[in-house]
Image (tube, coloured by chain):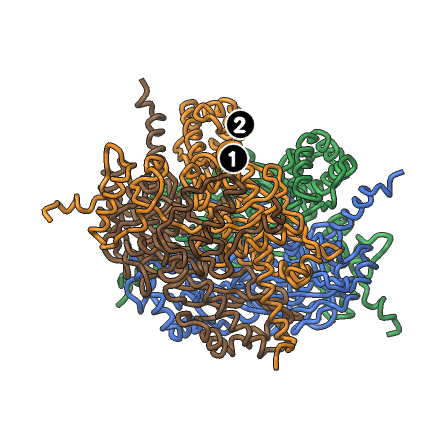
Chain colours: A brown, B orange, C green, D blue
Amino acid sequence: MGIPQASRRKIPRDLENDYTADAAEARRNFLRARTEVRLEHLSHYSFDPSILRGNIEHFTGVAQVPIGIAGPLLVNGEHAQGEFYVPLATTEGTLVASYNRGMKTLRQAGGVKTTILDDAMQRAPAFVFESAREARTFGTWLTEHFAEIKQAAEATTRTGQLRGIEQYFASRILFTRFVYTTGDAAGQNLTGKATAAACAWITGNYQGITNFYLESNFATDKKSSQVNVLRTRGKRVVAEATVPAALIEEHMHISGERLFRARQVSNLGGFMSGANNNGLQSANGIAAMFIATGQDAANVAESSAGLNFSELLPNGDYYISITLPSLIVATYGGGTGLATQRECLELLGCYGTGKVRKLAEIVAATVLCGELSLGWAILAEEWVTAHELLGRNRP
Amino acid sequence: MGIPQASRRKIPRDLENDYTADAAEARRNFLRARTEVRLEHLSHYSFDPSILRGNIEHFTGVAQVPIGIAGPLLVNGEHAQGEFYVPLATTEGTLVASYNRGMKTLRQAGGVKTTILDDAMQRAPAFVFESAREARTFGTWLTEHFAEIKQAAEATTRTGQLRGIEQYFASRILFTRFVYTTGDAAGQNLTGKATAAACAWITGNYQGITNFYLESNFATDKKSSQVNVLRTRGKRVVAEATVPAALIEEHMHISGERLFRARQVSNLGGFMSGANNNGLQSANGIAAMFIATGQDAANVAESSAGLNFSELLPNGDYYISITLPSLIVATYGGGTGLATQRECLELLGCYGTGKVRKLAEIVAATVLCGELSLGWAILAEEWVTAHELLGRNRP
Amino acid sequence: MGIPQASRRKIPRDLENDYTADAAEARRNFLRARTEVRLEHLSHYSFDPSILRGNIEHFTGVAQVPIGIAGPLLVNGEHAQGEFYVPLATTEGTLVASYNRGMKTLRQAGGVKTTILDDAMQRAPAFVFESAREARTFGTWLTEHFAEIKQAAEATTRTGQLRGIEQYFASRILFTRFVYTTGDAAGQNLTGKATAAACAWITGNYQGITNFYLESNFATDKKSSQVNVLRTRGKRVVAEATVPAALIEEHMHISGERLFRARQVSNLGGFMSGANNNGLQSANGIAAMFIATGQDAANVAESSAGLNFSELLPNGDYYISITLPSLIVATYGGGTGLATQRECLELLGCYGTGKVRKLAEIVAATVLCGELSLGWAILAEEWVTAHELLGRNRP
Amino acid sequence: MGIPQASRRKIPRDLENDYTADAAEARRNFLRARTEVRLEHLSHYSFDPSILRGNIEHFTGVAQVPIGIAGPLLVNGEHAQGEFYVPLATTEGTLVASYNRGMKTLRQAGGVKTTILDDAMQRAPAFVFESAREARTFGTWLTEHFAEIKQAAEATTRTGQLRGIEQYFASRILFTRFVYTTGDAAGQNLTGKATAAACAWITGNYQGITNFYLESNFATDKKSSQVNVLRTRGKRVVAEATVPAALIEEHMHISGERLFRARQVSNLGGFMSGANNNGLQSANGIAAMFIATGQDAANVAESSAGLNFSELLPNGDYYISITLPSLIVATYGGGTGLATQRECLELLGCYGTGKVRKLAEIVAATVLCGELSLGWAILAEEWVTAHELLGRNRP
């Protein structure tokens, strides 16, 4: 074709302005030429590509992910109060129905109480020294100079605040976690930038650092980890509810005692398998809400950690709770301002500044509904089998 | 306003056929009435809602998630061979650029070698007995009757095959993992149905089971866990490459020795923090490909587990590898047949049956490119700082 | 003072026969000369040092660890049946009393039922290849040649049997676990020797192994690990009992419901803290029995893993169980034949061949008594406080 | 025999004074009558049983655990400086020899540098509330009243100081860790008593606590856990050394590069297996020193956690380090004052107050020697095999 090999393979890019319909079309044509896929759906979007600057490179089209709604979800939060219709972007059949069913039951039980217990975003630089002793000396210096480091970090951001610096020593390395609050943004970029500035100040004012890494796998960004279960990343939120015995019986045709007994087995299963969650399906609701509302779906990795704690009360009522120790959400920045994403946030009254805690509460409340609903579904199976075992259904 | 309260709150649903444009519009109107959000973008989709049956309930519109492409990615796999342009659906700026950069370097290094080491999908019923002794007896019976159980399970599926049943004892409970291969489907539903049938046969033929649960948190579906890191869930895939010293120097302006030294610190950070991944950002590439290609994004929870192993070779070349022990992908079923999702699979030559291993290899190869690229980015920071430390850049 | 520096510092050793009272005395004199410690107690032992060959080097004296006895412990095992007086070597006050109290309660409850569910000892060689693909090929070969490998391994041992070889792939490495039964010996040495022989056969018959390590940290000898919780190391034993409501009330002056509620909190604490044990104090009983009976105390590291599972029965009775997934015990070899160690084994009727399962059952039963007793002690504190809270005890 | 059944089974106890030779002999006679074991060695001890008060109940005799000595160990610590002969109580052959070999090599390498990075002992009460919100309010109150709580806690102890109270929220529970320094005692009892007093003050001054447990499994006493790896329990100590290339070659007949390559495989094995230690055998040295010096051997469970970090330096030298994040040692209280135990502490110059940090450093230095020695032993095997593979040794 005369076209040099290199140019034939390189993805087209408009050096002037790459966020245009034409640039996207050029890339689709490039792909069409190589793969014979028509890409008729990918090209179907309803916004001006110029809004994507800062959100993506090589924009070529959109994934159309179906959204179903579940609700009303009744939340008794401190930031979210009242009924919500929750948009869930998913391709997994029964997911919306399952959450919807849980929402119905917990609405009749009086709603889901939500509480945010902590709020923290980290960047985790590591500092290497000649020996452990120098690392320790540096650790002390770090504590003593917190005010200056905080100033250096916060000079780079309008909303981020450096709450503290955690220290974890091993060998001749000091692993740190710079812990921030980040307002309505998820804050990974903000903390990266602020911590880089802080570290520039540190390395400019401290002699003897052999090596320094802005990130050391201790954040642990987009990874499930025990440190984040313990020390929080994003929001630490609890959703809890008490389901009256009569309601369990009416809705589920089983007793709370059965629900509870199953929970004990799940607790042990989660412990023995080394899972980061002894609950059932938090990732389902979280991923579906994340995609719908423009959150970073990669954060499902750590946001899906969960601690289920339930109790059978003396009167037969069932107390159920889920704690999400590392739920990363934003109502500002990232993908939150994009076309459908913003609409979904607006549906929840969660678009823009001052809304992030409300969103965190709605996510946690939604997750709790899914826990109840799937717990019941698994049990329905047991229940069927129990009948089988007793032979009642056999001719 | 004369509408009764209850009907006003219940999400509209067309009992005849709920997978229509009208039903979706009715729900959007319902939402508009309650929230004053116009939902002009959500309504913008290019497919017939009838295709969504089995994928979602209460369909109301779509999330438009921007897709960027990265590549060409050169894969030397057993199923994926040659160059691929990888669609990444994300709203996180720099993600596509980062992967793209890694792809360029590894292409020049000769491409990414990929190998699938295992293939397994589980459902994990638990059986409770009067005491541990009866659990043990049942375990033996289970082994002896594997052929019949396999037959019962496989009667429910065309593609699923029961490979074996793992047994994990604790207290008077036998936790099992029914391990299947599931063809080109992810297989969670398939294994659920087959295992239910198997358990029906079991409970019909074995006396003395006190209680039985179809799922016990040992699968561990949509949860990160050590058992899945050890025993595989979905595909266990390795991507590996050796980057020549000269190429590292040319592209990254650093030495392989620096890359490697940083890796040691990351390894320790990942170990001490209790992370499920000692690598850097597998969740980013995985989530973006999952959304683009119609995978279940909730599976990012376990699919994001990763084992990074790298070596500095005597000649200065850098060997880098990532092992994804629980990568759950499908090229058939689930969301793979939807409009844009199918197009993205077709772009990769991965739509339909017989393609799932190819897709798994492409995902793993993509992830490796992201590991190299981010490793380098963190180091660039170090490098800058190293200069700062040495005072070269100071006036 | 004319003694050359080197000889002054080197610990004296009798090259002819170092296992004599004289050799030990020479070393004590050496120490006395350097430290002015009289070592009058260390020298006080009642056996002929010649029995120590194979157990220790540089024998210098003995640690006198006080032994208390607890019991009778009533065991309803398959190998241990009846009442036992359990020797506990410890210096921690209240330990013996605590176990003794639990033994009394569970004896009145009808005794402790014990069941051994698995029996396995490992050595874990790793094999490194040029790429993951060669590792996979080798894995297949390993499975196909199991019979020959088994033969090579078992040629080195009278009692060890190679049950199977587990394979764990990562990168271009195949981590294996060679799983043995080892009769009445703990078996770490036996499996080391057998696996070395097996690997010699393997490396002599297979081309293409780049590197090979007899141990790869996957055994995981003397380390707590999830793989051993899941897959057993040593004996997997369950001890269980049901304590009648009336007995709980009589002995503990509390209800089973309180015991159970506390357990739920402990379960969550164990899960969130990332512990290898959701029970309370298995290490106490295990360490004390290990020292008394000549077990390897370093194995407390993995033997102390535990899974507590308890249930409150509808009638108020309390079902309690502990599962020890990696209890490493021996009644033959190691320190079992030494003077006091043998006596303690004989006290339990557990000295020599054919006794190891009996010993494992007694250890597990003992551990269960400690779980009940400490659970109750913590609760007694709660109970006091509960009274305080209610103001009953206040004037 | 006419003796009533009950009295025949109950272990004899002298209500006046149970810590006498006669009381012990009465118990031995009781055992002899029931088991026909002569117990001639158990009775062989060299101290007055009256010293055992507070250390054991039902004292019946002693375990004679053989002690070997290794050394000299050259320590360049802040508290331990110079050469030490280390008493190791063990029955595992080669253990003393292995440590001794490592000590020789590291002495020639200039000794082991040791650094204590943290010092902390915990008791972990949990407080349960009506909902998460009340738990959070209480958490704030706890922080505000730290001074008073500290006063209440410290009123019970001469040496313990309450450093802080860590808070870990889940559900409607606040798990706390009361963190103390405890001087030269291990401090578990001290912290228990102080925390009970603190909690008495708390529950007397705070309304609304539904339930309270003095321990919640978050301490995590005598259990391996991630929280203790992260946050320290006992002493956090690093031992490090750099072994010159020539010395490695001379002593081990291999290169540092081989040692290092093996280490990478061990690191990955430790990570994938979910071990609490990526090193090799810390439990061996720790258990042997614990028994010799009167430490609580049950603490091997958490003290054996370890973080190995090693580097191959550009000049071929090998940097090796071990971090013990939760090493629990005492030089005062517990078993440290008993006959042989005190002698062993005196051998190290570590008996009594003001010595605990010195002991911690010696333990860590000893552990490092074992890491080097076993790493080399595994490699020797590789080395043999490498020769086999290359065929040089074959005729």
| Residue identifier under label 2 | B143
| Residue identifier under label 1 | B167
Element under label 2?
A: helix
Q: Picture coordinates of residue D184 (x, y %)?
A: 57, 70
In the shown orientation, is residue C71 left or right of residue A278?
A: right
Q: Residues within 10 Å of mark 2 (few under 14, many from 20)?
A: some
Q: Earlier in the sequence, mark 2 or mark 1?
A: 2
Amino acid type of the residue that numbered disc 1 sits on in the rendered structure: Gln
Q: Picture coordinates of residue A239 (x, y %)?
A: 32, 54
Please say whether residue D148 is visible from this viewpoint: yes
Q: Residues within 10 Å of mark 1 (few under 14, many from 20)?
A: many
Question: Which quadrant is the C terminus of chain C positioned in?
Answer: bottom left
**Which is more toward the observer, A136 or A317?**
A136
Q: Above or below — where is B93 with respect to B50? A: below
Q: Are marks 2 and 1 on the same chain?
A: yes
- Mark 2 and mark 1 residues within 8 Å of each other at the beta carbon: yes
Q: Above or below — where is A151 with respect to D387? A: below
Residue at 85%, 66% (x, y): give it.
C7
Amino acid type of the residue that numbered disc 2 sits on in the rendered structure: Thr
Label 2 marks which chain's residue? Answer: B
Element under label 1?
A: strand
Label 1 marks which chain's residue? Answer: B
Q: Which mark is residue C170?
A: none
